[in-house]
Amino acid sequence: MKHSQFINKIKLTEKDFDEIAQKIKSVEEKTSGEIAVAITNESSTYAFWELLAALGTAIILLCSSLPLAPQISAWLSKIFWTENSIHLLGFYFVMCMLCVLFLYFLYNIPFFDRLIIPPQAKNSCVTNRALRYFTESGVYCTKENSGILIFVSYFERQVRIIADKGISAKISQDLWNLIADEMTESLAKNKVKEAYINAIERCGELLQEHFPCDKENENELGDTLVVLEADKWV
């Protein structure tokens, strides 16, 4: 999915992006902590699982059609004017390949895609993508190790809030997970902007308590919501 299509899908306007950025700025003025926010359409292409499911389903359909081999052979003999086992084998081979192609594209439809991909695979891909962006964006190397990432993977409908070691030493991950759960509920109602703004406010409250604003409150990370491309094949 193209960048612009995804933004239209989640119904975010330029004004929404500005409001999210302003919320981050206002929160960071009260704390020495840093907040980064990102969203991606999906954390992996999941091509392996889609192809595996297509092959598995095609094989099941092929096996279920074997009892019909005499009828199919008789039908083929009328077409080719002769009965030949090669024709039957060729028929099954072509039908299997067509089934795999059709099912592969069918399983690319998000509704079916979510059903065939194991939850463990989705969890792992989202976590890995969030951790990767955590390092790529520089959240891990703020001056006081007080950076935090709010990451959303839309297809998987999952949220990750990752805090740097300076924050983790003072604030339990369970609190970030609670905020992530609240954010997931808002996203399920297609309230993307509200989900981010509420999460930023909640994170800001925790950061203000443990990382109050100092005299040199440098803005070390960008304040805009970053829309990431889908990750590579996994």
Image: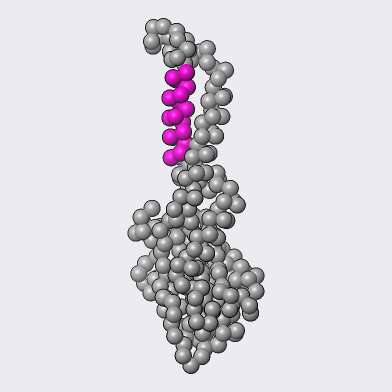
For the point 42% across and 62% down, which residue is it? 228
Q: Position of residue 52 (x, y in %)?
A: 52, 39
- As for residue 2 lying within the magenta part, the answer is no
In the rendered view, tell whether residue 65 sits above or below residue 194: above
Q: Residue at x 56, y 73 (%)?
A: 163
- Residue at horizontal 44 percent and vertical 20 percent from the top: 91
Q: Position of residue 89 (x, y in %)?
A: 47, 18
Residue 42 lies, with reference to residue 193, above or below; the image says: above
| Residue 200 in view in this figure | no
Q: Residue furthest top?
A: 82
User: For the stretch drawn in magenta, what is the main secondary structure?
Assistant: helix
Q: Is residue 105 left or right of residue 209?
A: left
The magenta segment: 89-105
Q: In the image shown, does 165 or 152 lie closer to the viewer? A: 165
* x and y percentages locating residue 227 in the rendered image: 41, 64
Judge whether 53 appears above or below 66 on screen.
Answer: below
* Magenta stretch holds residue 90: yes
Query: Residue at 38% of width from left, 61% of height from top?
Result: 7
Of 96 and 154, which appears nearest the observer? Answer: 96
Is residue 101 visible in the rendered image? The answer is yes
